[in-house]
Amino acid sequence: MSHPFKNNCPPPKDVFCPSGASEAPPGPVYQASSHYIHRKVADMDVLISVGGNIANFNGYIELNPSASLLWETLAQPKTAAELAAALQSAYGIAPEQARADVQEFLELLVQHEMVVAP
C-alpha cells in the first residue's frame, strides 16, 4: 500500500489496548476517534478534524481508497487482523500484504491519536 495519507507522518510511539478486558483479545482493538469525520469531497475521501481536536489540527487529510475503507471499518472496534481481512477481501491481496498495509496505517493513526481504545 502506498502511504495512506497524502502527507508524511512519523512512526508511532505506542499502541492503544482495551482496558478491563477479562480475556486477552487477539491483539489490540482500535476504533476511529470521534475527533475526525470522514467525508467525500468532489472525488476525494477526506478526514476532517472536529470538536476539541480542531485546535491541534486545522484542515483535512486526504485518504487513498484503501485507507478510506479501513477508516470506515474502524467505525466499530476492530483488531488489526479484522482490518487486514477487510482489506484482503476488498482488494484480493495476499494476507501478508494486507497485514503489512494495515500495520502501516495503524501506526500512523496511533501516532496522531486518530484511534482510541473502545
Image (tube, grey):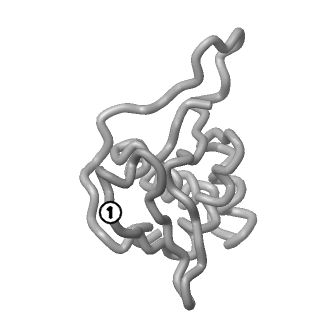
Foreground pick, 50 / 15: 50
Residue 97 sits in quarter: bottom right
Q: Residue 117: name its quadrant.
A: top right
Q: Is residue 67 left or right of residue 84?
A: left
Q: Foreground: 18 or 101? A: 18
* Mark 1: amino acid: Asn
Q: Which residue is mark 1?
A: 58
State the residue at coordinates (71%, 58%): 86
Q: Quadrant of residue 2?
A: bottom left
Relative placement, left or right, of 89 versus 109 is right
Could you say where residue 70 lies in the image, as x and y percent from the top left?
A: 61, 59
Residue found 65% across the figure and 16% down from its top: 24
Q: What's the residue at 53%, 26% (across, down)?
A: 17
State how many labels appear: 1
At 29% from the left and 35% from the top, the residue drawn is 13
Is the residue marked by circle 1 packed among few (<14), some (14-19), or many (20+) residues within 10 Å? few
**What percent of the width, then of the height, locates residue 110?**
41, 42
Instruction: Using the image, determine if residue 67 lies above or below residue 20.
Output: below
Q: Secondary structure at mark 1?
A: loop
Looking at the rendered image, the quarter that the C terminus falls into is: top right
Residue 95 in percent (x, y) is at 63, 56
Instruction: Find residue 26 and report its horizontal and vertical position in percent.
Output: 65, 28
